[in-house]
Image (cartoon, rainbow, N blue to C red):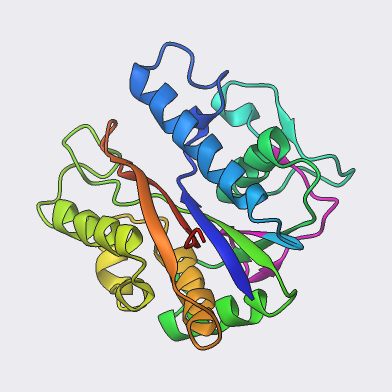
Amino acid sequence: MLVAAAVCPHPPLLVPGVASGATGETDDLRAAAAAAVQALVDSEPALLVVVGAAPQVGPCDPQVRGSLSSYGVDLLVGTGTAEATLPLSLTIGLWLLEQHAPDVPRLLFGVHPETEPDRCATLGATLAARETRVAMLVMGDGSARRSVKGPGYLDARAEAFDDGVAAALAAVEPQSLHDLDPVLAGELLVAGRAPWQVLAGAAEARAAAAPALTGDLRYAAAPYGVCYFVATWLPVAT
């Protein structure tokens, strides 16, 4: 069952070597992501599942590594011996775990960006059922069309889309994430749509058997024309 979740973006600039010369917003984003991952560790999961966009749907070979060499940093992520073929989302997710949760049992799970919402939700429910205490680290950026300097230039629809995601994350509204339009998300260059809908399925499965989670939107900004969110869904403190 899902006991805790964190949503983080996956820009390479989360890694200090890549972010050299970046603004103070990078420090704020990195601090928020670190605190979110620590919150997952504090939930004492039996399994921590990292979900991110990938070419194929399914679990990753634990021996596969990620690389940031194409971003100017000679860094391999992961302790396996296989080729460095992890997609960026799971590379950054694994890097966050190595920094802040090195000893928690983990599973890296890829979801294709075009996976339909209902299948994403089914995947989430299945992942949440793998252990009695499952935490999820869900990697995904918002729209990359938030400004004229963004990767996809400016789209007037992007701000409202991202505001809707931020509200859903803050209020723990899995149905709102489930209802995100895949076509619109694709047009707005949203990398997180499918992973967020995996989270929605896991949270909806929990809702039938456990008290509600409480949300904390720790970061929401588009400093480089791409919207980044950091949020946690955690049990209500007793």
Residue 204 rendering spot, x and y as whole percentages: 47, 81
Left or right of 21, for residue 90:
right
Taking the magenta stretch, the answer to whether it contains residue 54 is yes
Left or right of 83, for residue 111:
left
What residue range appears in magenta? 49-66
Tell me what residue is drawn at x 14 percent, y 50 percent.
155
On screen, 175 above or below 217? below
Kindly indicate the quadrant of the structure image that contains residue 106. Answer: bottom right
Residue 231 rendering spot, x and y as whole percentages: 41, 50
Residue 73 rendering spot, x and y as whole percentages: 63, 21
Which of 236 and 101 lies nearest the eye of the viewer? Answer: 236
Residue 128 rendering spot, x and y as whole percentages: 64, 75
Tell me what residue is drawn at x 55 percent, y 86 percent.
209
On screen, 80 above or below 72? below
Kindly indicate the quadrant of the structure image that contains residue 43. Answer: bottom right
User: Residue pushed farthest left?
Assistant: 156
Picture quarter with the N terminus: bottom right
Tell me what residue is drawn at x 64 percent, y 81 percent.
126
Kindly indicate the quadrant of the structure image that contains residue 146. Answer: top left
Tell me what residue is drawn at x 25 percent, y 37 percent.
225
User: Residue pushed farthest front?
Assistant: 238
Q: How many marks?
A: 0
Left or right of 158, for residue 180:
right
Taking the magenta stretch, the answer to whether it contains residue 53 is yes
User: Residue pushed farthest top?
Assistant: 21
